[in-house]
C-alpha cells in the first residue's frame, strides 16, 4: 500500500512538473491554431501545412506540430527526410527545420519507419501530445500550427486541455456529409470553450485548364451557409487544384506561382491574421472592463497567489506556499508567505477567505474552487503568467496583468 502511494505521489509530482514545463513553453508562443475537421479527406493537413508555410514566408516564426498519431502526413507533404536533433537542454529534442522560419514535429519523425502502424489507446495519445510540447525544444514562436486528426476524439481533446489558448480553424468541403460533421467540430469547440477563428471551405470548385470554366465537384456555398448559420467567419474558399496534390505527393508543398489556389490561400492567411487581431482586441476590451469593475471603494486589497520556487505555481491546489500581498491606494504593502492546508475539496477556498483574501491570481483552477471563492466574495483572475508574485500584483494594480484561459489540465 505504501509503495503504491509512493508511486502515485511520484507520478503526480512528475505530471505537475511536466505541466509547469508545458505552461512555460506555451508562454513563448504568441498564437496557437488547431486545424481540425469533422471528417477525413477534406484536405485538413494540406491546409495546416500551407498555413504554416505561408506564415513563415511572411517572416513569422512558425512551428507545425502534427498530432495525428495514427496517420501522420505532414512530414511526407513537406519532404522532411531528416531526423530530430538533440536540444541544448538534457532530455530535450529539437524539431526538424523545414525552412529558416518553420520547424516541424511529428510522430513519424520520431518513429523513423514511415509505414509503421501506431496502436495506442487514449491515455497514451494524451501523453505523447504533452511530450510534444514539454520535451521538444521549440523556438520562441509567433505561431504554433497544430494539425489534428479528423473528428473530435482524444487528440483534439488533449490539445484543448493542454493548450488552453488554442483557437480552432475548421476545414470542410461543400458536401453535406462534410458539413454535417463540421457542425460536430463546432459543437466540440464550444463545449470545451475553444474559440473558433473560422471555417475554410476546401475543394469548392475546379477550373478547367483548357476552357477556364469552373466546375463544381460537390455542392456550392455550403461553407458560407454553415458559417452564417453558426455565426462564424468564413475565412475563405479553396479551389480543387491537381498541382497541389502532385506537390504533396512529391513532398514539395509551396505557395509560389500564380495558381488560383495560391491566390485564394493568401486571402485566407489575411483573414486568419485579421481574426486573431479582432480576438486580441476583444480580449483587451474585456480585460479593461474587468479592471474597471474591480476598483475597490477604499483602495484596499488582499491578493493571494499560489507560489512554488518564488514564482506563481500554475496549479492552484499543489503549490508550496501562498503569497498574501496587501495593497492600499495602488501601492504594495506587506507580504506574507503561508503554507496551505492539505489539498482537499473546498478547503483552500475557505482558507483563503479566512486569511482575508479578496483577490486570487492563479494560473489554473477547477470550477468548484472558483465557484467557492466567488461565493465568498473573492475575485478570481485565471491564466496569469508564471512570474514573481510582487510583479503580478504590480501588473494587477496598473491594469497591465495579461490573463489567459484556465490552465487547469486535470
Image (cartoon, rainbow, N blue to C red):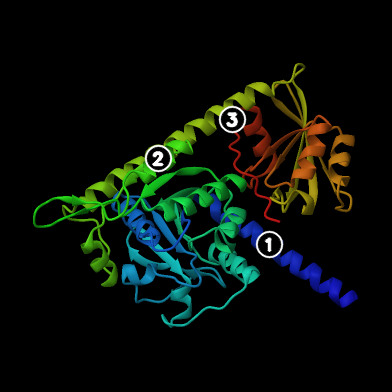
**Secondary structure category for the residue under label 1:** helix
| Residue at image location 70% in from the left, 64% down from the top | 15
| Residue at image location 88% in from the left, 46% down from the top | 347
Given this view, does label 3 or label 1 mark the residue nearer the observer? Answer: 3
**CA separation in Å, label 2 and label 1:** 45 Å
- Residue carrying label 2: 225
Left or right: residue 283 versus residue 3 is: left
**Secondary structure category for the residue under label 3:** helix
| Residue nearer the viewer, 77 or 38 | 38
Q: Which mark is residue 287?
A: 3
Given this view, does label 2 or label 1 mark the residue nearer the observer? Answer: 2
Asked if residue 394 is positioned above or below residue 35 in the image, the reply reads above
Left or right: residue 392 versus residue 285 is: right
Q: Residue furthest left?
A: 210
Q: Earlier in the sequence, mark 2 or mark 1?
A: 1
User: Can the viewer see residue 142?
Assistant: no
Q: Earlier in the sequence, mark 2 or mark 3?
A: 2
> Percent x, y for residue 325?
77, 35
> Percent x, y for residue 240?
26, 56
Asked if residue 213 is positioned above or below residue 18 in the image, the reply reads above
**CA separation in Å, label 3 and label 1:** 29 Å
User: Can the viewer see residue 107?
Assistant: yes
Q: Earlier in the sequence, mark 3 or mark 1?
A: 1
Quadrant holding the N terminus: bottom right
- Residue carrying label 1: 17
Q: Residue 45 is drawn in which quadrant?
A: bottom left
Q: Residue 286 is drawn in which quadrant?
A: top right
| Residue nearer the viewer, 242 or 92 | 242
Amino acid at each position: 500500500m505504501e509503495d503504491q502511494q509512493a508511486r502515485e505521489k511520484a507520478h503526480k509530482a512528475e505530471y505537475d512538473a511536466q505541466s509547469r514545463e508545458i505552461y512555460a513553453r506555451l508562454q513563448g508562443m504568441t498564437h496557437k491554431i488547431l486545424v481540425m475537421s469533422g471528417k477525413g479527406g477534406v484536405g485538413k493537413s494540406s491546409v495546416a501545412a500551407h498555413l504554416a508555410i505561408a506564415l513563415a514566408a511572411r517572416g513569422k516564426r512558425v512551428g507545425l506540430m502534427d498530432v495525428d498519431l495514427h496517420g501522420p502526413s505532414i512530414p511526407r507533404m513537406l519532404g522532411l527526410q531528416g531526423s530530430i536533433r538533440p536540444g541544448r537542454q538534457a532530455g530535450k529534442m529539437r524539431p526538424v527545420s523545414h525552412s529558416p522560419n518553420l520547424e516541424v514535429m511529428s510522430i513519424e519523425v520520431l518513429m523513423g519507419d514511415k509505414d509503421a502502424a501506431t496502436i495506442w489507446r487514449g491515455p497514451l495519445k494524451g501523453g505523447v501530445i504533452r511530450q510534444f510540447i514539454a520535451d521538444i525544444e521549440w523556438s520562441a514562436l509567433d505561431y504554433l500550427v497544430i494539425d489534428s486528426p479528423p473528428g473530435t476524439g482524444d487528440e483534439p481533446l488533449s490539445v484543448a486541455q493542454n493548450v488552453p489558448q488554442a483557437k480552432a480553424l475548421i476545414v470542410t468541403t461543400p458536401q453535406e456529409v462534410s458539413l454535417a460533421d463540421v457542425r460536430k467540430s463546432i459543437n466540440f469547440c464550444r463545449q470545451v470553450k475553444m474559440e473558433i477563428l473560422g471555417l475554410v471551405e476546401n475543394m469548392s470548385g475546379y477550373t478547367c485548364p483548357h476552357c477556364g470554366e469552373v466546375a463544381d465537384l460537390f455542392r456550392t456555398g455550403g461553407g458560407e451557409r454553415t458559417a452564417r448559420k453558426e455565426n462564424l467567419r468564413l475565412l475563405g474558399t479553396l479551389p480543387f487544384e491537381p498541382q497541389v496534390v502532385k506537390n504533396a505527393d512529391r513532398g514539395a508543398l509551396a505557395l509560389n506561382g500564380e495558381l488560383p489556389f495560391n491566390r485564394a490561400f493568401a486571402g485566407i492567411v489575411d483573414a486568419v491574421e485579421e481574426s486573431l487581431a479582432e480576438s486580441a482586441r476583444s480580449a483587451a476590451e474585456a480585460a479593461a472592463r474587468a479592471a474597471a469593475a474591480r476598483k475597490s471603494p477604499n483602495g484596499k486589497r488582499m491578493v493571494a497567489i499560489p507560489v512554488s520556487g518564488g514564482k506563481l505555481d500554475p496549479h492552484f491546489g499543489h503549490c508550496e506556499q501562498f503569497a498574501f500581498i496587501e495593497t492600499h491606494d495602488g501601492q504594495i504593502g506587506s507580504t506574507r508567505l503561508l503554507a496551505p492546508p492539505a489539498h482537499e475539496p473546498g478547503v483552500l477556498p475557505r482558507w483563503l477567505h479566512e486569511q482575508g483574501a479578496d483577490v486570487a491570481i492563479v494560473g489554473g483552477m477547477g470550477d468548484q474552487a472558483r465557484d467557492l471563492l466567488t461565493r465568498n466574495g473573492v475575485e478570481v483572475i485565471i491564466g496569469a503568467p508564471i512570474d514573481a508574485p510582487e510583479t503580478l500584483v504590480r501588473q494587477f494594480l496598473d491594469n497591465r496583468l495579461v490573463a489567459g484561459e484556465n490552465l487547469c489540465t486535470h
